[in-house]
Amino acid sequence: MTALSALFARDARIAIRIGGGAMMGVLFFLTVVTLVPFAIGPDLALLRRIGPAILWLGALLSSLLALDRLFANDHEDGSLDLILMARPSLELVIATKALAHWVTTGLPLVIASPILGLFLNLEPAALAATALTLLVGTPALTFIGVIGAALATSLRRGGLLLPVLVLPLTVPVLIFGVAATNAAVVGPMPFETPFTILCALTLMSAVVGPFAAAATLRHGME
Amino acid sequence: MNLSGLDLTCIRGGRRVFSRINFSVGAGRALVLTGPNGAGKSSLLRMIAGLIRPAEGRIALEGGDGELSAGEQAHYVGHLDPLKPALTVTENLTFWARFLNGRADPDEVTRAARALDAVGLADLAHLPAGYLSAGQRRRLSLARVLAAPRPIWLLDEPTTALDAASQDRLREVMHTHLSGGGVVVAATHGPLGLEQAGELRLGQPSDGPGTPSEISRTGTQDLAP
């Protein structure tokens, strides 16, 4: 456990230090959400209706922004070799790195979402529902993204490869995240149905993501 | 403790780097890997570390912790220095010490301070690692080896970027490790100054894809004086 908690503390510390990726995600989120009213015009009713979807899209894009550095930085400075040689199983090591990444980039998005929701004329119930679904859904985005990060590092290609690989896999999370939010605000569907599916997607990706990423790294780093 | 490689063959990118290498190093002994660029010195070290799977043959370890592989009981110091520029020298070192030890160590602070002292970086302990020179980065990487005790040291050209004084210090540290019953496997072009070291010369493999290399031969304990 000491090894894993040390890794968590290191990754979190690097992310919040100067030059880390933690605040960049929130700034990107802010930029995406601010751009939307410029594109569709100042129709307050329309903004209120599509607000949750815009917040979800913004959070999805922002959470993928810093992911391609998750293993690439460690690969470039040789840390990944030592991480692959580690005594704790690689799956746990990757889950720890993903958790540290979510706490430093995903969680700030959840916290920022009610403030950005005000820009989109969302009512309090919608703000709360969006924050709750993001809190439950963004870990799934990170754990799915870990697979793409491992692939991008193994193939020694960064940049756009990761979003192209990962975005299609995040479609179910997006569908049920927005569906749950809309169900809470306008109905007529009960909130629990899409919300529990969203929870299930997160739990599933928390298991599948680290295993797939570990297999990718073991195979690709030889 | 005895670390040995049996009939090791390495194929990288379809090219046979070396074939049917045998070696054996006992406790308190060092094995120096020599040979021209591309002969497979780094590949052999990475193979012992468990980072490359051998195409044929296997790595065997007698003694040591039976539940851990050779790589899990080894320090690997490669070409790159695994340091984060945003963290200070001490933070970098204590992270690796904790990660590699895997358990809470009550005197990790003193151990880390001693390791920094041994490589002559004690004065820079609070400086972010991004400001270190190449030689200082190398010394911090070597401090990691001292901060977490492990029996096998795999060193890939450890003297790169080190000044004369640091090379002397490295030699002392390796001597202490060997006299404590440790094992050192080092790839090098220059002399390391280890008297009791076997040598394994890796050469270019012969042209035929299946034939064993002619130049490569065993570097076993009996080569040591």
Image (cartoon, coloured by chain):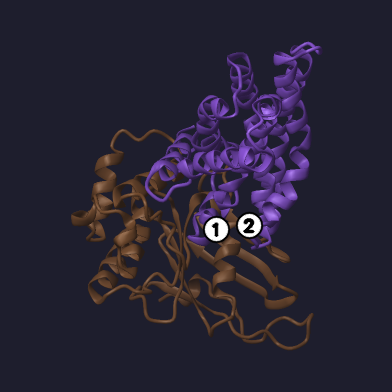
Callout 2, which amino acid? Thr
For the C terminus of chain A, which image quadrant?
A: bottom right
Which residue appears farthest toward the front when viewing the image?
Answer: A42
Callout 2: 10 Å neighbours few (<14), some, many (20+)?
A: many
Mark 1 or 2, nearer chain start: 1
Which residue appears farthest toward the bottom when viewing the image?
Answer: B207
Q: Chain of mark 1?
A: A
**Disc 1/disc 2 C-alpha distance (Å):** 7 Å
Callout 1, which amino acid? His
Q: Is residue B124 above or below residue B109?
A: below
The spot of residue B36 in percent (x, y) is 53, 85
Identify the secondary structure beneath mark 1: helix
Q: Answer yes or no: do the residues labelled 1 and 2 have beta carbons within 8 Å?
A: yes
Q: Which residue is label 2 attached to?
A: A153
Q: Which residue is label 1 attached to?
A: A75
Q: In the figure, the brown chain has which letter?
A: B
Taking A99 as reference, is B176 left or right?
A: left
Q: In the figure, the purple chain has which letter?
A: A
Q: Nearer the viewer, residue B8 or A96?
A: A96
